[in-house]
């Protein structure tokens, strides 16, 4: 096994979808700009063709530049089209909202609206700043152009013209754009490792207060200080707006694009979810096994810097396919093993199907792909040794081990590799009579070495250092089983 594999680039199909998403959202932005220009009045209507050309050039520049940046620096987003689609829809929504709310006042432009929505749905929080910066630039350029076409605002500000109203509008627009960029840079840092919606609201209120302070400080440089200070209440409204909108928009984006967010993962790991309730009632042994695997997977994910929420959710659902034949799996049996009465090839087919059946169930219940894919990857292409050995005893000729192996996919990410190791380790250690640190260590080294030798980790970027950290983490997790217990009166421990 190679110590580390490079991340695969996106396919042409994925790139094509990203281009189509970009073109559609750019068209929406141009159409919204046209409506805004039309509503502005006759001064722009007379030059409407010129406005159309400007809007097209602007959209091509900003949206095209964003796509190029994502293609080069954020290939993860292109590979996961759902995320790119959600990001660019959120950005376009914020742009359209800002265009029309500016009719009332430019100070009602909600600072960090794009950043707050994206930071709550992104697995890479830094994406929020990039999309927020692009949206701020587009909004500023459109409104500046509108000001030039209607009042000659830029020239008046530069030349010190007498049109105070135009100067004020332009000043407020620049101030709120600076605040917007600042909030967009702060949000990804503030919410990087936080998942609670209450914390998001708290940070939003802090940002609102900071925006007001920044607005007041910048207002001291304006000629008519009392006038601009009297408008600070609009900044308060605009600061609260991202909090309100994101609380409604983010769950909607999660649902429409079936996204994996920290909040969504926590909801998936809720025992009251329909599929979890089925697993607990129809296959209680598998359910308890999944809970144990989830605990170890979460600790292992933390140990190697992976997402612990995703690891826990994936572990909860990795064996849901056993619901199709729960009593053919040891943890759900009560003394009688139905495999004793059937041929090994039939047993192998029944057991093998739980991976693909699990994937189907996950899709049926709306489980995101990042979690569902682990059901077909946690056994990879490993052989089912028990049935293979039984077949060799019952057959005089050669037995093809592939007929007694899983027909799944080898892990394509570290989370699936963690589940593969934790799943096998939990079952093997539970089967040991008297587990101790040394025996468990030997067992884990054997499990990991076997998976490496069989090429199970060749398609994911997990390293030998990561595998060693996982081994040590599992040993530590089972440490509570290795010490001697106090003997109580009557012989109970």
Image: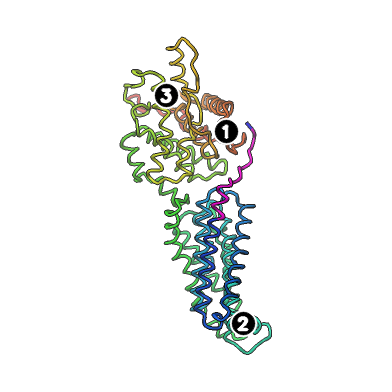
- Neighbor class of circle 1 (other Cα within 10 Å; few <14, some 14-19, many 20+) is many
Measured as percent of width and height from the top left, residue 202 is found at: 47, 63
Earlier along the polypeptide chain: callout 1 or callout 3? 3
Residues in magenta, as a range: 2-19
Measured as percent of width and height from the top left, residue 12 is found at: 58, 47
On-image quarter of the C terminus: top left
Q: Is residue 316 magenta?
A: no
- Neighbor class of circle 3 (other Cα within 10 Å; few <14, some 14-19, many 20+) is many
Residue labelled with disc 2: 153
Residue labelled with disc 3: 348
Tell me: residue 313, above or below residue 157.
Answer: above
Q: Is residue 6 magenta?
A: yes
Question: What is the CA distance from the residue labelled 2 to the residue labelled 3?
Answer: 76 Å
* Left or right: where 50 falls relative to 398: right
Secondary structure of the residue carrying numbered label 1: loop
Earlier along the polypeptide chain: callout 2 or callout 3? 2
Residues under numbered marks 1 and 3 in contact, where contact means CB atoms less than 8 Å apart: no
Q: Which mark is residue 457?
A: 1
Secondary structure of the residue carrying numbered label 2: helix
Residue shown at 47% from the left, 51% from the top: 259
């Amino acid at each position: 096994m190679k110590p580390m594999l490079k991340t695969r680039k996106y396919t042409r199909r994925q790139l094509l979808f990203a281009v189509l998403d970009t073109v559609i959202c750019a068209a929406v932005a141009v159409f919204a700009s046209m409506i805004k220009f039309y509503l502005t009045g006759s001064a722009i209507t007379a030059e409407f063709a010129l406005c159309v050309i400007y809007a097209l050039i602007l959209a091509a520049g900003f949206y095209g530049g964003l796509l190029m940046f994502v293609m080069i620096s954020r290939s993860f987003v292109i590979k996961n089209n759902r995320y790119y689609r959600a990001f660019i829809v959120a950005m376009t929504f914020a742009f359209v909202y800002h265009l029309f709310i500016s009719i009332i006042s430019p100070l009602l432009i909600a600072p960090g609206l794009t950043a707050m929505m994206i930071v709550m749905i992104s697995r890479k929080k830094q994406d929020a700043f990039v999309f927020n910066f692009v949206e701020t630039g587009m909004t500023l350029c459109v409104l500046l152009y509108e000001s030039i076409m209607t009042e000659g605002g830029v020239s008046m500000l530069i030349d010190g013209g007498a049109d105070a109203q135009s100067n004020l509008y332009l000043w407020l627009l620049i101030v709120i754009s600076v605040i917007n960029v600042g909030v967009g840079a702060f949000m990804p840092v503030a919410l990087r490792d936080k998942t609670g919606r209450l914390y998001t609201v708290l940070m939003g209120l802090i940002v609102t207060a900071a925006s007001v302070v920044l607005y007041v400080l910048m207002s001291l440089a304006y000629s008519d200080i009392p006038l601009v200070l009297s408008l600070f209440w609009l900044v308060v409204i605009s600061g609260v707006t991202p909090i309100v909108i994101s609380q409604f928009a983010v769950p909607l984006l999660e649902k429409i694009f079936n996204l994996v967010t920290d909040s969504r993962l926590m909801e998936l790991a809720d025992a009251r979810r329909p599929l979890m309730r089925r697993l607990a009632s129809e296959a209680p042994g598998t359910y308890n096994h999944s809970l144990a695997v989830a605990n170890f997977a979460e600790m292992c994910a933390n140990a190697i810097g992976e997402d612990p929420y995703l690891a826990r959710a994936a572990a909860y659902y990795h064996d849901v396919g056993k619901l199709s034949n729960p009593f053919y799996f040891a943890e759900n049996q009560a003394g009688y093993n139905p495999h004793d009465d059937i041929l090994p090839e039939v047993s192998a087919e029944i057991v093998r199907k739980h991976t693909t059946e699990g994937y189907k169930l996950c899709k049926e219940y709306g489980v995101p792909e990042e979690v569902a894919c682990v059901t077909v990857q946690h056994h990879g292409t490993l052989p089912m040794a028990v049935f293979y050995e039984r077949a060799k005893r019952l057959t005089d000729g050669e037995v093809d081990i592939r007929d007694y192996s899983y027909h799944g996919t080898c892990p394509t990410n570290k989370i699936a590799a963690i589940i593969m190791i934790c799943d096998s380790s939990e079952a093997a250690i539970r089967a040991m009579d008297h587990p101790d640190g040394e025996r468990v260590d030997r067992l884990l080294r054997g499990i990991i070495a076997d998976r490496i030798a069989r090429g199970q980790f060749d398609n994911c970027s997990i390293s030998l250092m990561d595998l060693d950290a996982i081994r040590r983490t599992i040993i530590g997790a089972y440490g509570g089983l290795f010490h001697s217990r106090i003997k109580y009166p009557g012989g109970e421990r």
